Amino acid sequence: MSRRGWFLFAMMCLIWGLPYLFIRVAVEHIEPGTLVFLRTGLGALILLPIAMLRRQITVVMARWRWLLVFAVIEVVLPWLFLSDAERHLSSSLAGLLVAAVPLIGAVAARFSAHGDRVNAVQLTGLLIGLVGVGSLVGLDFGQLNLVALAEMAVVAICYATGPIVLSRKLSDLPSLGVIASALTVSALIYLPFALLRPPDLSRSSVVLSVVVLGVVCTALAFILFFQLIATIGPTRSTVITYVNPAVAVVLGVLVLHEHLSLGMIVGFPLILAGSILGARKAAPKPDPFGETVTQVPRAAVSGPAV
C-alpha cells in the first residue's frame, strides 16, 4: 500500500471511531433529534453543493422513492436511536455493539434471495460473534439499560440493512450524490425537532461535538473514504470497520474516563473474530458515522455516523 493509502486508511480508522465519543458529549445537552438535524444539516451543506456542481443530484432524485427508503434506514432511524441510546450507555459500549453489524449483515446477505449459502467458516464466525455479543451484554447485564440496548439493536439492524438497499436499488448511481441527497432528506425530516427543541450551544464542548460530527465525521469522512476506495480499492477499505470500535473504546476510556468492563474485554475480541469470519466476501460492514460499508460498482458507500 502506498503512503497515501496508509494515510487515508489511518485517517478513516480514527474519524469513524470518533462519533461515539462526541455523540455522548452532545446528548447531555441536546435532544437526540435536534443533534441528528445539526449533524445531517452540516454534512449536507458541505456535500450537496459539491454533488450539484458534479451534476449528480438530478439522476439520484429521479429514484427518490428508494433514496428515501435508504435515507430512513441508513440515517434517519439509526442516528436517532444511537444518539438516544448514548444518553444511557457509554460511548465505548455503543461502539462495540455497532461492531456486531457484520454478523447481522452476513445473515441477511446469505439468507436473502440473492445471497449465497452460509459455509462452515462463516457459520463458525457467526456463532463466535454471537457468543461475543452475549458476553458483551451478559457479563455487564445488571448495569445496562434495556431500552438503550433495544435501541442499539435497531441501529445494528438498520446499518446491516441499509447497504443491501443501496447495492440492490442505488448501486448504479454516483455515491457522492446518493450520500448528499440522503443527508439532505434526513435534515429536512429532523428540521421540526430542531425548531421545537432548539439546541443549547452555550457550551464550547457541545459546539465542538456538533462541528466534529457534522464536518469531520460526516462530510470530510465521506470525501476521504471515496479517495481511500480509489487508492486501495473497496475490499481493503472495509478493513477500517474492524478498527473503529477499538478507537471508540480507547477514546471513551481515556477522554471520558469510562469503565473498561469485563464484558468489553471478553466480548470485543470474539465479535471481531466472528465478524471477520462470518462477513467474508459480500457482507456489509459497520460505519457511523457509524457507521456501514458495502461494495458497489461506482464506489463503496458507508452509512453512521456512527
Image (spheres, rainbow, N blue to C red):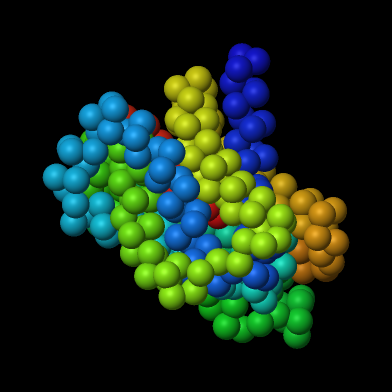
User: Residue 299 location in percent, x, y?
Assistant: 37, 32
Q: Quadrant of the N terminus?
A: top right
Q: Is residue 263 above or below residue 9?
A: below
Q: Is residue 264 or residue 280 the one in the foreground?
A: 264
User: Residue 102 location in percent, x, y?
Assistant: 51, 54
Residue 7 lies left or right of residue 156; in this view the side is right
Q: How many marks?
A: 0
Residue 264 lies left or right of residue 99; in this view the side is right
Q: Residue at x 64, y 23 (%)?
A: 6
Q: Is residue 230 or residue 236 the one in the foreground?
A: 230
Q: Residue at x 70, y 80 (%)?
A: 144
Query: Is any atom of residue 296 visible in this view?
Result: no
User: Residue 124 location in percent, x, y?
Assistant: 57, 56
**Quarter of the figure with residue 92:** bottom right
Q: Is residue 124 above or below residue 219?
A: below
User: Residue 8 location in percent, x, y?
Assistant: 60, 26
Q: Is residue 283 or residue 34 the one in the foreground?
A: 34
Q: Residue at x 60, y 36 (%)?
A: 12
Q: Quadrant of the C terminus?
A: bottom right
